[in-house]
Amino acid sequence: MKILLGIAMFAVAFGANAQGVYKCVGKDGKTSYSANPCPGSKELITPPRTGAPANSPGGGGAIVPDMQPGKWNLHFTRKGRTKGEDMCGDPIDGMRREVQQYAANAKANWGCTMTTSPAGGRNVNIVYDCPSDRSPDGRPVQQGRWEISIVSASPQAFRIEMKSTGEGGYVMVGTRIGECEKAVK
């Protein structure tokens, strides 16, 4: 059950509550985002819809906030050690896909539950609970409980915190730092 291990690599939280995010275009043509209206802002980016519990009827799974693609500075902390790196793209797209896949397969295929709850604005809490080390059809699964909190004040910053009964905890913090360099042909 590598899904949980992948998600576990990305998780935990800190506490800003954004109610909305304004897209601002400066006189120089550069776009920025703010929790407060900016002079001349024309487009309000509303927080994403919040998810119903994934194991409830009609539950669509966790709503992981969208991040603005570009160059990102990321910091991963586990067991008191922090590693930093830069990357291009959407830094949590892989996590978003894993959460969607997990929501679709958790109960029927693995015997686990996944619930989500909105935490205000672009923030969401996700809980995975696998009470047994066997799936309904007898395959081994990773038993345990994972609590993930995603906090994102804007499409240009986030913090993810994960706590697990078996894996310990992880923190991932990301800040968008610009555009990706174009490849030279």
Image (cartoon, helix red, strand yellow):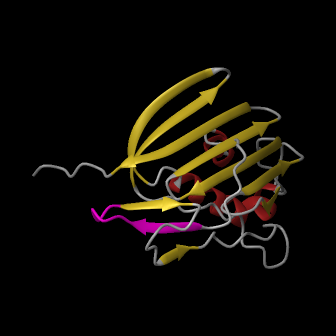
Residue 179 at what x, y percent from top left?
31, 52
| Nearer to us in this view, 163 or 16 | 16
Q: Position of residue 10 (x, y in %)?
A: 61, 42
Segment tinted magenta in the rendering: 21-30
Q: Quadrant of residue 161?
A: top right
138 vs 66, left or right, is right
User: Which residue lies at the image location 74% right of the left edge and 69% below the top edge?
Assistant: 51
**The stretch drawn in magenta includes residue 170:** no
Q: Is residue 109 above or below residue 50?
A: above
The structure residue drawn at horizontal position 90% and vertical position 47%, both measured from the top left corner, is 131
Seen in the image, is 73 located left or right of residue 160? left
Whether residue 12 is situated above or below residue 113 in the rendered picture: above
- Camera-side residue of 103 and 21: 21
The count of marks equals 0
Q: Position of residue 35 (x, y in %)?
A: 59, 61
Query: For the view shown, which residue lies furthest in the right direction?
Result: 131
**Residue 12 located left or right of residue 41:** right
The residue sitting at 70% across, 66% down in the picture is 104
Residue extending farthest to the top is 80
- For this orientation, the residue located farthest to the left is 185
Which quadrant of the figure has residue 19? bottom right
143 or 81: nearer the viewer? 81
Point out residue 123 in the picture as x, y percentages from the top left corner. Answer: 70, 58
Asked which quadrant contains residue 101, the reply is bottom right
Residue found at x 84% / y 42%: 133
Query: Is 22 contained in the magenta span?
Result: yes
The foreground one among 151 and 85 is: 151
